[in-house]
Image: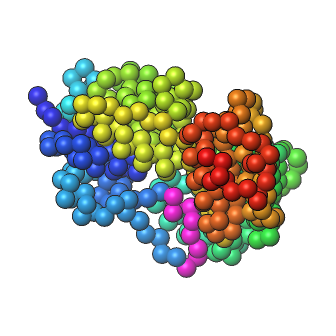
Amino acid sequence: MTNRILIIGAGHAAIRAALAIREAGHEGPVTIIADEGSELPYERPPLSKWSDDAVTCALPIVPIEQLNAANVERIAGKVISLDTGNKQLVLSDGSQWAYSKLLLATGANARQLPPATNGDTAIHYLRDIADTVKLKQAASVARQAVIIGGGFIGLELAASLRAAGVAVHVVEAADRLLSRAVSMEVSRIVQQIHQRHEVQFSFDVAIEEIMSQPCTVKLSNGTTITTDMIIAGIGSLASTELAQQAGLAVSNGIVVDSHLRSSDPDIYAAGDCCAFPLYGPGGQATRLESWQAAGDQGEIAGHNMVAQTARSYIKSPWFWSEQYDHVLQVAGLPSTQMQLVQRSYDETHHITFGLNTDGTLGYACGIAPGLKIAKDIRLATKLIEKAVPISKDALCDPSIALKSLR
């Protein structure tokens, strides 16, 4: 019987898991299998942040020497079936791989526009470095671009395209930017920053039709936009096909417990592909698309696959995004039951806090030039995890240091 641990995927969760498996004392084989990125596992966040003169290259998650020193085997291949009964994978080349424990770190796929909407028009999506190369090639000859979706990816690409001298028009179905992630106040600041860089916006509209000759986007309000390239950043779908085929529990992601273990006790999942209980056992099932969460979950899953004592994933969600020379950060998750409290230092340095019904802090989002916001959100994260009631008046007052509220 094999003692091999297999990891499907080569992203942040996968690499952190492989190293954690070694740190937990596993001496048997550890093998990463992925159809993209396995040779040199690279970071995904930089893919949406570039300029016209920047060289497109992979930024390694860790030095390749570190993976070699840990004896982490990397195989380029596509897994086409998972037999949980026999604990075996089959790759597209016909090879079979047995495992003792398996980690699914399959990530997520870009949500696609309906084929009826765009017909034969080329639409750019962003998930890997090949997509970035295609985007930059198109941008090098484009004068104008339409970005469908005013979320993190769409706005980061808008900033990158403006740095490359391309005119940008962002089309958003909601009535404001980042509506599911940040407050109205922070959303307004983000929009103003982009407008200062001459980005145009259309809100509360749907895409009616995309035509290729010439390349135009027709909106539900009657507006027609002529463009040279179209990018869709309309969210993602967890990559769960393999898990579903194998009969694992799936609901907006591969369902896992607080130990990141799936409905099969020898199979774990981590990163964008999994739905986990927020803040530990009994928490709301949540799926995050977060670099930080992927790495933390990978480490915990790797540890739990080997160690005698399991750890729970209970960390507060944390996100960040670069918007030109400003940084936006979010801690926790917002809900409609929260009372929102505003703290403003100046017109571009602002934080929104979300208080739970019991007076504890559950959420914070903020934006500021450079790294000014980092300390505030770091302290907010600690307050969320401490889970003690906090004065609304103190949160509002920028003269009161957040660290004094702990």
Question: Could you tell me residue 261's position as x and y percent?
Answer: 37, 28
Which residue occupies the extreme front position in the image?
A: 404
Residue at screen point 23% across, 27% down: 87
Residue 111 belongs to magenta span: no
Based on the picture, tell me whether residue 52 belongs to the magenta stretch. yes
315 relative position to 100: left or right: right
Residue at image x 77%, y 42%?
A: 392
* Rendered location of residue 247, percent (x, y): 38, 21
Residue 326 visible from this viewpoint: no
Classify residue 20 as left or right of residue 362. Answer: left
Q: Nearer the viewer, residue 225 or 37?
A: 37
Count of labels shown? 0
Residues 279 and 199: in front is: 279
Q: Residue at x 69, y 68 (%)?
A: 369
The answer, for residue 188, to whether it is visible in the render is yes
Residue 178 location in percent, x, y?
Answer: 71, 49
**Which color scheme does this rendered protein use?**
rainbow
- Looking at the image, residue 287 sits to the left or right of residue 395; the answer is left
Q: Which residue occupies 43% across, 69% down?
A: 57
In the image, which residues are magenta?
A: 45-53
- Residue 245, compared with residue 325, is above or below; it is above
Residue lying farthest to the left in this orientation: 1
Instruction: Report the quarter where the N terminus lies.
Output: top left
State the residue lying farthest toward the bottom: 53
Above-or-below relation of 345 to 30: below
The picture places residue 381, in percent across and down from the top left corner, at 58, 47
